[in-house]
Amino acid sequence: MKPKRSLHATGRGTSASGGAGSRVRLVLVVCVTALLVGLWASNPSAEHYQRYLEQQLAARASTIDPSIGGEERRRLEMMIAVKGRRLMTAVVHDHTRRYTVGMASLYVSDLPDVHLTTLGFATIFVPVSGHERGILVLGRLLF
């Protein structure tokens, strides 16, 4: 009769190093999965993109003409804020296509004479092409 082998002798049992290694792998898998789910959940929406365009237009408008006085500048900024919101809603909802690629979104806005392409990832937007000209076109559409 053959003697029974112990699980520890075969290396298949639980040992201090084997258990710790599998726990580390498990923790790593859980952390990576949580990160991926978090990034996927924070994929920017059309509303995020609209706010991004509004901010870009407002930032560009603040550099329009430094000689404009305080009261006139405030009226101009208010007009840009009100009309800009309506314009951005029309641009985003009527003239923008969104391509979702996993955890990121590619926004392509078809504006007169320019395609504004922007990559959105975790509510951060990165201009891809046509950004400078696209913001200028949006500014012209306001007036």
Image (cartoon, rainbow, N blue to C red):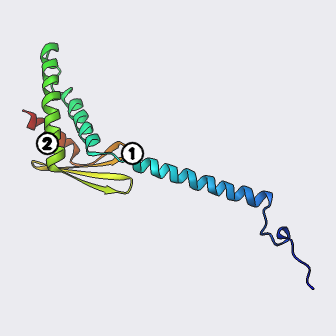
User: Label 2, label 1: how many angstroms apart (C-alpha)?
Assistant: 24 Å
> Is 102 placed left or right of 84 in the picture?
right
Does residue 136 appear in this view? no
Residue under label 1, please give it.
42
Q: Callout 2 environment at 10 Å: few (<14), some (14 to 19), or many (20+)?
A: few
Image: 95 above or below 85: below
Tell me residue 2's x, y (percent): 91, 83
Residue under label 2, please give it.
90
> Is 116 placed left or right of 35 in the picture?
left
Q: Mark 2: which secondary structure? A: helix
Tell me residue 45's x, y (percent): 30, 45
Q: Mark 1: which secondary structure? A: loop
**Which image quarter holds the N terminus?**
bottom right
Q: Hey, what amino acid is under mark 2?
A: Ala
Q: Of the numbered discs in the image, which one, if any, rests on residue 137?
A: none
Residue at far front of view: 1
> Is 142 placed left or right of 56 in the picture?
left
Viewer-closest of 134 and 16:
16
Q: Hey, what amino acid is under mark 1?
A: Ser
Q: Which residue is drawn at 66% across and 54% down?
A: 24
Image: 137 above or below 105: above
Tell me residue 109's x, y (percent): 18, 49
Viewer-closest of 80 and 128:
80
**Which image quarter holds the C terminus?**
top left
Does residue 64 appear in this view? yes
Tell me residue 66's x, y (percent): 17, 21
